[in-house]
């Protein structure tokens, strides 16, 4: 069975509610005629309830950009899986490099978050990727191996079937520099092997690419074998660009 392909908007800390409403009002008029591509919008926490309602019965789904790894308690400023589920959210981004490098998320914390997401029946979008020094010193595969195996350790492997992986080389995020086709192909091939070695149903997991995906490079990236879709930052803020990328998947 072919793997589902994904076109995911990570709006980061950009859209306020009126921006999101305007985007989604126009999105409703777009013809999403490819049943093999799922679209997911990941707005800020404060917009989840409203956007859940706006998406209503549309085929697009809702994701959060982060979650905490405890189910409740004295954790000022954090948000739980149950709170996300209350909004109608099904997906959660975990391990994004901006959280790893700027907001203190460690491999262990990402593991705990992934564990909690699975435990509470949400679907994770696990982000992994090397920084430029790691790539230049030939450490890419080692980094991907470490990030996946720590994140997934001791988690029921069958439950990980709902997981998406987003390969996002840190140096390609928001820079306008995209990884070359051979870099992406090699990384996605390695990721599938690492999943297999960790006892995960590697052929069933969709692996997305993220990092300066644009209207111009989407088609060639999409043609790389083992690329099952995109996690898009900047270009997802412009409806025409996002829709054009959807149509190239
Ligand atoms: P850009 O598409 O802006 O490079 O961001 C990618 C990303 O971080 C998606 O999560």
Image: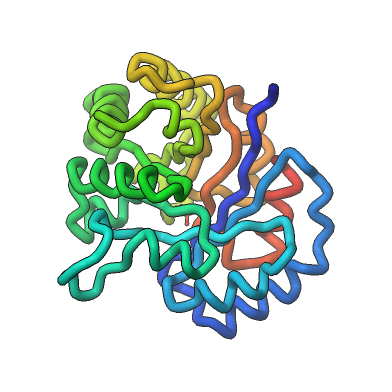
Quadrant where the N terminus lies? top right
Lateral position of residue 48 relative to residue 137, left or right:
right
Determine whether 175 is above or below 49 in the image.
above
**Residue drawn 76% across the image and 47% down it:** 247
Residue 107 appears in the figure: yes
* Image coords of residue 103 (percent x, y): 22, 60
**Residue 234 in view in this figure:** no
User: What's the colour scheme?
Assistant: rainbow
Q: Residue at 28%, 56% (x, y): give it.
A: 99
Pinpoint residue 208: horizontal percent, then vertical percent: 52, 38
Q: Nearer the viewer, residue 202 or 215?
A: 202
Tell me the residue at 64%/38% (across/down): 5
- Give the quarter of the figure containing the C terminus: top right
Q: Residue at x 57, y 31 (%)?
A: 227
Q: Position of residue 174 (x, y in %)?
A: 43, 56
Front-most of residues 172 and 117: 117
Indicate the quadrant where residue 22 lies: bottom right
Q: Quadrant of residue 57?
A: bottom right
Q: How many discs appear? A: 0
Q: Is residue 105 above or below residue 198?
A: below
Front one among 182 and 74: 74
Q: Residue furthest bottom?
A: 18
Seen in the picture, residue 247 relative to 220 is either above or below; the reply is below
Left or right: where does residue 117 sit relative to residue 202? left
Q: Nearer the viewer, residue 134 or 92?
A: 92
Residue 9 locus on image (x, y percent): 55, 57
């Amino acid at each position: 069975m072919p793997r589902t392909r994904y076109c995911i908007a990570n709006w980061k800390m950009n859209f306020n509610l009126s921006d999101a409403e305007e985007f989604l009002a126009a999105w409703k008029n777009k013809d999403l005629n490819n049943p093999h591509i799922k679209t997911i919008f990941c707005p800020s926490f404060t917009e989840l309830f409203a956007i859940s309602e706006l998406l209503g019965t549309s085929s697009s789904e809702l994701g959060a950009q982060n979650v905490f790894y405890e189910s409740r308690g004295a954790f000022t400023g954090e948000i739980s899986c149950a709170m996300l589920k209350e909004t109608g959210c099904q997906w959660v981004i975990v391990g994004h490099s901006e959280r790893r490098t700027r907001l203190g998320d460690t491999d262990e914390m990402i593991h705990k978050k992934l564990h909690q997401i699975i435990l509470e029946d949400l679907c994770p979008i696990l982000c992994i990727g090397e920084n430029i020094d790691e790539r230049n010193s030939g450490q890419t595969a080692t980094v991907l191996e470490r990030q996946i195996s720590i994140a997934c350790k001791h988690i029921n492997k069958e439950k990980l079937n709902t997981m998406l992986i987003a390969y996002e080389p840190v140096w390609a995020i928001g820079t306008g520099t995209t990884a070359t086709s051979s870099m992406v192909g090699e990384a996605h091939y390695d990721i599938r092997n690492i999943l297999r070695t960790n006892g995960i149903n590697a052929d069933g997991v969709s692996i997305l690419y993220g990092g300066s995906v644009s209207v111009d490079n989407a088609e060639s990236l999409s043609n790389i074998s083992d690329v099952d879709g995109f996690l898009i930052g900047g270009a997802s803020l412009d409806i025409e660009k996002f829709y054009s990328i959807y149509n190239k998947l």
